Amino acid sequence: MSPILLFILLLILSFGVVVYFLRPSREETAVQQHLAGIEESRTVGASGIDILREQRSGSAAWVENLIKQFPASAALGRLISQSGQKYQLGPLVIFSLIVTVVGSWVASWMISSVLLSILVGLALGLSPFLYLYTLREIRFRRFETLLPEAVDLMARGLRAGHGVGAVLEMVGQEVEDPVGAEFRSLTEEQNLGLPLREAMLNLLDRVPLDDVRFLATAILLQKETGGNLALILDKTAFVMRERSRLRGQLRIYTAQGRITGWILCFVPFIIFGLISLSNPNYEKALFTEPMGLKMVYGGLLLMGLGILVIRKIIKVRV
């Protein structure tokens, strides 16, 4: 197992070194972008002007294109954008693969089981995406906290006589990030000529929250059917605050279940590490005896089922 993992590690490292040294410099990238812009301006004709900004793939564009052939690439790209980070998909996936191989190789020296070594490597390789998922959840919570304030600001702006586009721009300038950043992107898309409906749907795609869906529905319905948008936004802000209050109460009521889930996740591994430090040969039978390996696999399986059950119990949709 170790020679195979070492070969794969060297292969991935060689691939990463080649990608790194073959990437264009900043000057070359700037020249290529300038030439591409000139070419686009020359080729615009009767077919119309494409105002949508293309998301660039970074220096290793061919790596990005290769990764985008896989079905999960779109979900990973959304995860990166929703977490508010500027990482490129290609380098992130390559880094995850290197961590997986290195982690499996190191684990194979300490654990005789091939399957457990691969599981350890996979867990380490998925850690960057778990980090992005955590950042996304923190960002979404911050967004939900600031959104009622943004809706109130929009309602006051409408009562003062401003238009919908002006109040959206006002939110981007006055409200803190991440709400301000997302509304600035929405305003930029509108300034480039994108219809309000498409800009709101793009906002909903970047921030797929129920509160944002309520806001987008209210604005688009008022645009199509008419009505007092300021009054609608006031009621929308009230609903958002009530939902936020209810979510806070649910977090209090489910605190014991969440703490139990965290204990179930981490305490067994912490105890295992402490026992390994005090007596390295104590748990050796778990990885050398067939019955010990079965116990480890069964314990991991039951631990995963327990986490899923606890998550199902404490996750209440508001």
Image (cartoon, rainbow, N blue to C red):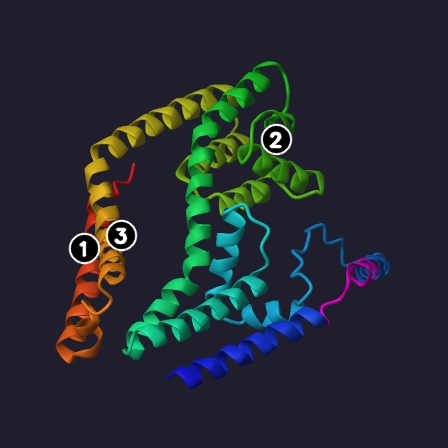
Measuring 49% from the left and 36% from the top, which residue is drawn there?
A: 216
Magenta range is: 22-31
* Label 1 – label 2 distance at C-alpha: 43 Å
Task: Confirm whether residue 202 shows in the render.
Answer: yes
Q: Give the labeled residue for mark 2.
A: 172
State which mark lies toward you, 2 or 3.
3
Give the left or right position of residue 242, taking residue 26 as reference. left
Front residue of this view, candidates 278 and 317: 278
Give the mark nearer the N terminus: 1 vs 3: 3
Secondary element at image label 1:
helix
Question: Amino acid under label 2?
Answer: Gly
Return the x and y of residue 211 as percentages of the image width and height.
42, 35
Return the x and y of residue 17 as percentages of the image width and height.
64, 73
- The rendered magenta stretch, by its main secondary structure, is classed as helix
Measuring 16% from the left and 68% from the top, which residue is drawn there?
A: 298
* Label 1 – label 3 distance at C-alpha: 13 Å
Measuring 38% from the left and 69% from the top, which residue is drawn there?
A: 121
Q: Alpha-carbon neighbours of circle 3 within 10 Å: few (<14), some, or many (≥20)?
A: few
Q: Residue furthest left?
A: 291
Q: Give the labeled residue for mark 3.
A: 266
Position of 308 relative to 194 (above/below): below
Return the x and y of residue 31 as percentages of the image width and height.
84, 60
Position of 266 relative to 280 (above/below): above
